[in-house]
Amino acid sequence: MNAPSSPFPFDSVIAAAAEKVEGKVVAWRRDFHQNPELGNREVRTAKIVADHLRALGFDEVREKVAHTGVVGILKGGKPGPVVALRADMDALPVAEEVDVPFKSEVRTEWNGQKCGVMHACGHDAHTSILMGVAEVLAGMRAQIPGTVTFIFQPAEETPPIGEDGGAKMMIEQGCLANPKVDAIFGLHVTSIFPTGMIGYRSGPFMASADDFRIFVRGTQTHAAMPWRGVDPIVVGAQIVTGLQTIVSRQMNIAKEPSIVTVGVFHGGVRHNIIPDEVKMEGTIRAFDEEQRNEVHTHVKRIAEMIAQAGGATAKVHIHRWYDVTVNDPALTDWSIPTLGRMAGDANVKVVDKVCGAEDFSFYQKAVPGFFYFVGCTPKDKDASTAAPNHSPRFFVDEECLKLGVKSLSALALDWLATHA
């Protein structure tokens, strides 16, 4: 089903309103960038958001949802369905290396380690964009046929160890209820595309994300007498090699890709001692829930059986984090004409799957959802070599912010008008 080319004459209104609010959006983004806060600690950011929504006359503003989340309800002047828009607010434990006047100098502690804090994934842009959308839509609320729920979410980058948070907790605490949301939209700025470009994909778009820990237990002995013990380092190395056969030999990669990566290998304290234990940590990525479960089974079996063959033991712990981000096919097809009107048809493109993960996936399991990318690399730079999201050198071209405001505003208004 295609969106009407002009359900009502809002395109020019959106364009003018986005132009008017652009300066504020840039200022908010710079302020958030200079004052970043980690997951479940977005107290200052949340207060700025909540104060802004109240100043716009929102019908309801809920604070402290999932610790620091904010949910704003804007009821239009005409009856109709409910659409939600989501932005994430948290920064990353990264020390910034970008030389901008509003560079983050913040330092704090994360999971017991001292670290810098930086909006290295662009959530400062997301929050500012959605605040701009709130101002645009509040200015035309009398004409809106339905209700818009604004979700400002903490801890997308995962909460601190021992805490709950993020999209899953926001849903549990009612962000999609009262009023009941019928569809949800979200965006993410990315340096892999130039400013002005919007990237999307129907169906599986971003991977699931799980982490694993493997503890290999051997028998400590003198390094000069390895036969007197069981070497967990050698057994662990064999496990690392064995895990690489999961994707290459045991998964149907013609169906969907998957990834198993070991990123941590710790063992031993001295050159002439074979230790008792080795610890490994890694990540699992998949685009299909059945394959995701198969990978989990293979990781556990391979680690345990290789350890047993070497006279050691292995304990495997797998933690499920984010599900596959799956764009609802019908909602995706519906959204493309609207994005084309806002960005120009030539700038809206189907893109490859992304092995990064997003907890927007939890919203999509509850209601139909559409998630898309907005390019943020300056047009005079090569996006293929730009520092990626999560890099200390990640850079957001602020020219992308207005397109974010326009596209989210138009998606919400078009969807409400189509389904009123």
Image: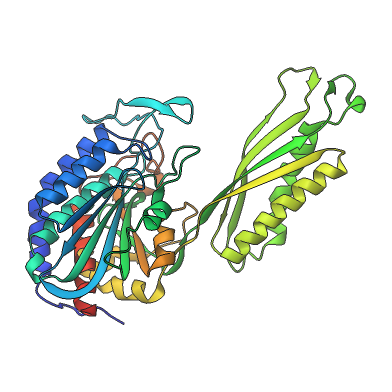
The residue located at (10%, 53%) in the rendering is 56
Q: Position of residue 262 (x, y in %)?
A: 63, 42
Q: Is residue 64 left or right of residue 144?
A: right
The residue located at (33%, 38%) in the rendering is 119
Name above or below for residue 133 compared with residue 38. Answer: below
Name above or below for residue 271 compared with residue 233. Answer: above
Q: Position of residue 374 (x, y in %)?
A: 30, 55
Q: Position of residue 3 (x, y in %)?
A: 24, 78
Q: Nearer the viewer, residue 135 or 57?
A: 57
Can residue 378 be seen in the rendering of this structure? no
Quadrant assignment for the N terminus: bottom left
Q: Nearer the viewer, residue 386 or 67?
A: 67
The residue located at (73%, 44%) in the rendering is 241
Q: Quadrant of residue 416?
A: bottom left
The residue located at (22%, 47%) in the rendering is 128
Name above or below for residue 67 compared with residue 344. Answer: above
Q: Quadrant of residue 328?
A: bottom left
